[in-house]
Image (tube, rainbow, N blue to C red):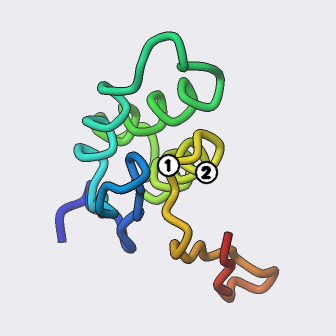
Amino acid sequence: MDRLQFEVPVRIAPAPGLPVEEIYSVEQALDVLHEWPKKRQGKVYEAAFNACFGATVDVVKTEDACRAFMAFCRVSGLLARDMMITAKRSGGEARGLRF
């Protein structure tokens, strides 16, 4: 598996009426972030961009970049309604969360 590939793709709905897209990697996440309008960029956008860029140069773990990108998508309204988000429980178990 490519080191920049997400364990689980991030499902986004770019606009009403358009099909859901799956983002499989840091590179695809960066493509989405590059296309985001400048006037709508804020702190969550910057955190996601920095995390994804950091993953490309081995400063940030890929899954941390994925979580930052997912947070950006959730806050900006891009996250698909059927996207399952995993959260770690104390003890290391993962559980599914639906937003």
Give the residue displayed 70% in from the left and 76% down from the top. Answer: 88
Residue 78 is tagged as 1
Give the residue displayed 41% in from the left and 57% down from the top. Answer: 12
Q: For the residue carrying disc 1, how many other residues have a C-alpha within 10 Å: few (<14), some (14-19), or many (20+)?
A: some
Q: Is residue 47 above or below residue 16?
A: above
Give the residue displayed 54% in from the left and 19% down from the top. Answer: 41
Give the residue displayed 41% in from the left and 62% down from the top. Answer: 10
Q: Is residue 58 above or below residue 74?
A: above
Quarter holding the C terminus? bottom right
Using residue 88 as the reference point, say whether residue 33 is left or right of it: left
In the foreground, 72 or 50 = 72
Q: Which residue is mark 2?
A: 74
Q: Amino acid at mark 2?
A: Arg
Q: Amino acid at mark 1?
A: Leu
Does dot 1 land on a helix, a strand or a loop?
loop
Q: How many marks?
A: 2
Rendered image quadrant of residue 98: bottom right
In the foreground, 19 or 35 = 19
Residue 7 is tagged as none
Using residue 36 as the reference point, say whether residue 89 is left or right of it: right
Q: Is residue 47 above or below residue 77?
A: above
